[in-house]
Image (cartoon, rainbow, N blue to C red):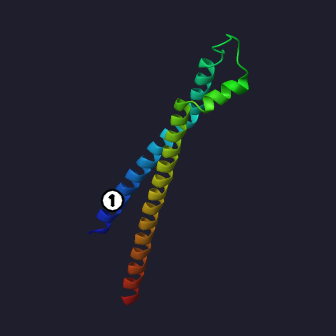
Amino acid sequence: MANEEITEKFMQELRECGAAYAKAKTERSMLEHYRPVCKARIMAENSICKKTGKDLPISKQERIALTHPNYLQCITELSEKIGIEAKTKWDLKLCEIRHDRWKTKMYQLNAEKKGYQ
């Protein structure tokens, strides 16, 4: 393969890894911002005691919200997105390392060729 083809292959790999990382980061950020909204909605739905009809204390509303299945699902999804983001970030870093190693090898070969001339 010619150097231009190899360089383009590395650049395409970097673009793909970068796009995957950006998507994962976006999804994580969205869920991080949604988590308090989810909690607030659950608290609002449970702000009144069903037995007495009186307002529940904030601490009790929060306890209900933090143990609600919807909130737990939100946290689970967030943790999955964090894992995906970490993996794609590492994949991007590996792409960069492979490219840097290839560049170093090319520089060394060129330096060797110049030494023989």
The residue lying toward the viewer, choosing from 116 and 9, is 9
Looking at the rendered image, the quarter that the N terminus falls into is bottom left
The residue lying toward the viewer, choosing from 8 and 98, is 98
Q: Please state which amino acid type lies under the numbered disc 1.
A: Glu
Task: Please tell me whether residue 102 is drawn above or below residue 52 in the rendered image.
Answer: below
The residue drawn where x is 48% and y is 39% is: 27
Direction front: furthest residue: 51
The residue drawn where x is 32% and y is 68% is: 3
The residue lying toward the viewer, choosing from 82 and 3, is 82
Direction top: furthest residue: 53
Task: Please tell me whether residue 116 is drawn above or below residue 58 in the rendered image.
Answer: below
Query: What residue is shown with label 1?
Result: 8
Position in image of residue 10 (x %, y %): 36, 61
Looking at the rendered image, the quarter that the C terminus falls into is bottom left
The residue drawn where x is 56% and y is 32% is: 71
Q: Is residue 71 left or right of residue 5?
A: right
Position in image of residue 7 (x %, y %): 35, 63
Crowding near the residue tagged with mark 1, few <14, some 14–19, many ≥20 C-alpha atoms within 10 Å: few
Task: Please tell me whether residue 14 is drawn above or below residue 106 in the rendered image.
Answer: above
The residue lying toward the viewer, choosing from 117 and 3, is 3
Position in image of residue 69 (x %, y %): 53, 31
Direction left: furthest residue: 1
